[in-house]
Image (tube, helix red, strand yellow):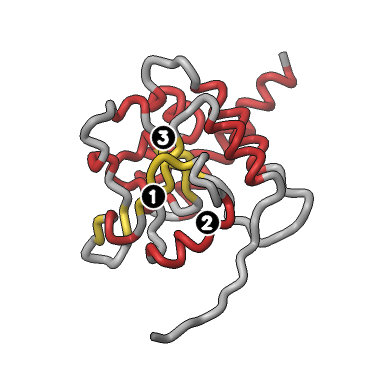
Amino acid sequence: MNIQKAGICIRPGAIECLKELSKSFELISFTASDGEYANAILNFLDPNNEIFKCRLSREHCVITDEGFFVKDLRIFANRNIKDIVLIDNSATSFLFQLENGIPVLPYFGGCEDSELLDLTNYLKSLDGLDDVREANKKMFKIKEMYQCSNLDDLFQVFFLKHISSLMEKVVL
């Protein structure tokens, strides 16, 4: 057995955020990481198994021909897909169900990070919606991103449209 040590960097407020969200939502950990590595982190975050109802890892993902690990939400056959969100810092993780995806920025350290606070507020806004995918489509426009063939298209679609919209509001 080859044992390796690896450090982890936990976002500020991660445990508090997870505990708060677990009061209103069923939280399931679904990672493309190796199960042993994932469990080591989850045991730190949730040592008494009170936050996450289930733990899924790499072996539960679908691997594409290009080598991407995709989290196929159809694995949750006993739940309606309109009620599921998948939060990940890699949009390739939700390729099979783009509208269910909520992208987050990767965390590399720092106390000023507010990603989890923003995420918590957004998730709470989804509570009670008939279909979370409709809200995600409007908020993140992930399908439109994947339809862009290059960075110039992406810039045109998202940045310039956003700036034009802001300018119209300022002029009014």
Mark 2 or mark 1, earlier in chain: 2
2 vs 3, front mark:
2
| Neighbourhood count class around disc 1 (C-alpha, 10 Å): few under 14, some 14–19, many 20 upward | some
Residue to which mark 2 is pinned: 43
Q: Are marks 1 and 3 in contact (CB under 8 Å)?
A: no
Considering only vertical position in the picture, is 88 above or below 141?
A: below
Observer able to see residue 83: yes
Mark 2, other Cα within 10 Å: few <14 / some 14–19 / many ≥20: few
- Image quadrant assignment for residue 2: bottom left
Residue located farthest toward the bottom when viewing the structure as drawn: 2
Q: Position of residue 107 (x, y in %)?
A: 63, 56
> Which badge, 2 or 3, is on the more N-terminal residue?
2
Q: Tell us which disc is closer to us: 1 or 3.
A: 1
Q: Quadrant of residue 163?
A: top right
Quarter the N terminus occupies: bottom left
Residue drawn at 58 percent across, 51 percent down: 45
Read off the residue under disc 3: 85
**How far across and down, in percent of the image, does residue 43 sit?**
52, 56
Residue carrying label 1: 55
Q: Residues within 10 Å of mark 3 (few under 14, many from 20)?
A: many
**Front one among 149 and 118:** 118
Q: Secondary structure at mark 2?
A: helix
Q: Nearer the viewer, residue 1 or 13?
A: 1
**Residue 63 x, y percent position in the rendering:** 25, 61
Real-space Cα separation, disc 1 to disc 3, in angstroms: 15 Å
Residue at 57 percent across and 28 percent down: it is 122
Q: Amino acid at mark 3?
A: Val
Residue 51 in percent (x, y) is at 51, 40
Residue type pointed to by label 1: Arg
